[in-house]
Image (tube, grey):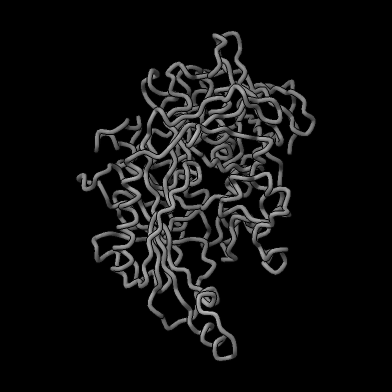
Amino acid sequence: MRRINDTKAYDAIVVGSGANGGFAAKQLCEAGFEVCMLEKGREISSKDFTEHVLPHELPLRGKQDPRNPVLERLPIQKRCYACEETNAHFFEDEIDNPVTTAKGKPFWWIRGNQVGGRTLLWGRQSYRMSDYDFKAKSHDGYGDDWPIDYATLAPYYDAVERFIGVSGRREGIPVLPDGQFLPPMAYSCGEEELAKGVASLGRRMTIGRAAVLTRNHNGRLACHYCGPCHRGCSTGSYFTSNNSTLPAAEATGKFTLVANAHVRNVVLNAEGKAEGIAYVDIASGKEMEVKAKVVILAASTLGSTRILLNSKGRDGEAGLANSSDALGRYLMDHHFMSGAQGVMPKLSRKPERANRPNGIYIPRFKNLETKESDYIRGFGYQGGENVTVYEHAAANPGFGAEWKHAQRSANVAHMQIGAWGEMLAKPENRATLDSAQVDKWGIPVLHIDCEWGDNERKMAKDMVAEAVNMLEASGVEEVAKFQLTPPPGFCIHEVGTARMGADPKTSVVNEFQQTHDVDNLFVMDGSSFVSIGCVNPTLTMMALTVRSCEYLAGELTAGRLG
């Protein structure tokens, strides 16, 4: 880590080192600009990764230990599938960093706490949005269209995919545009049968498009299928800021990284321009400040929104870049954990690809050309076959050599598909500041008021019904429904609180994620989303960041910023 020079004015400050902050730093450094990155979390190394630690090496064979003091401080986040005994330190301490929610409206915010942010923990599913998403209002009349279309963003999707490495298969499906793919991973035998069943209903299925390398790429090694990606990856086989964008920025010699920097607010000068960032050095508790010509917030959707809400405008009022009163509003997440599962008929084979870090994907098929349900928008499915060797034995306990042989040879194959559904953008779903609650460092925390609506509830029922139809069409037996629908936030796809738009009266940023109110202040993360669609949003966030940085670099070079 290069230490910050307090007297130096950088070309740009980037707040946050996750997927978007990493790309912002890379793009600007490679364009010749001096960049200072501020990251609230600590620096890490491969010593923090535990993907090769085996269950028998852990106190409770990998299950969460209630005596673990780190887990005790993660009452919400420890519910996340990715939070385990060995990697709980990758999640942000909720006692020191609280959030409040409206009565009866829980919001489960999952946060990273290290350089690289949640790129160490993400599910790596990487799908492009289409004009069914960018121009959704034009299709069904609800909400607002984005000020850009798919053709505008396509070259930037290309650039991101080529750099990070996304494995997948070209399918020619309009609602799920193809990308620049590395070789795809293979289906299991059971998934081949699922694909046939899905096709029999006039739908399509593909292997998941994942930011996991299937061959060596950009100095990183191909995945060796060890399994638990959320514990870190010593070979750099899945994309993180740590193994890709941050090293690229560092290689330019123009990059300064400051970890343990808890940002308090954006600092304005007398002319109302952003001139820097005020932050707390977590290690010492000292109040610090760094200056630059341009400020980029990429601290995650809610993280960036909190910084803006804690910043004062030129008029002294709290809430920077909020002349539209849209800041904090239109909070969205995907609703999920609705679908079905069952048992595949016995297949004469041994378990295969048990640790493949990917699943299948069934793209949205509802409400595309015509409205065909009692809700608008749609959903796509993820899941696949889980071939087990011993887990099924718990349902049929026994003993002796004959019983053991039967269990070993059973190879019961389970098939599960669950849907990710679109949440509508509504102004009442929002984040504000809780004036009565501060974090450990005295900074006001977020108060979140967000809940699922009737459209999401109707859609969830259809998610279940259609999952049952597709599994049964594929020959899956003992089909069981599930509809858990946890609170918003738990899908970890939160977007929308500093929405993009051409009209400063109704939006926070323009099509380049530049705030309407302060022209040298940018918000480059999920905050700018106008609608969420139903695909995982990170690839779109990164493509938007690359496009915004191209514009920003041109403006800086021309002397029109700072």
Name the residue: 71% across, 31% down. 440
Residue lying at the far bottom of the rendered structure: 402
In the image, residue 350 lies at what x, y percent? 49, 80
Image quadrant in which you'd find residue 184: bottom left
268, above or below 444, in the image: above
In the image, residue 99 lies at what x, y percent? 59, 34
Name the residue: 45% across, 34% down. 450
Residue 269 in sight from this viewpoint? yes
Name the residue: 65% across, 25% down. 443
Image quadrant in which you'd find residue 470: bottom left
298, above or below 167, in the image: above
Q: How many marks?
A: 0
- Nearer to me, 114 or 219: 114
Residue lying at the far right of the rendered structure: 284
In the image, residue 378 lies at what x, y percent? 31, 47
- Nearer to me, 146 or 420: 420
* Residue 501 appears left or right of 553: left
424, above or below 505, in the image: below
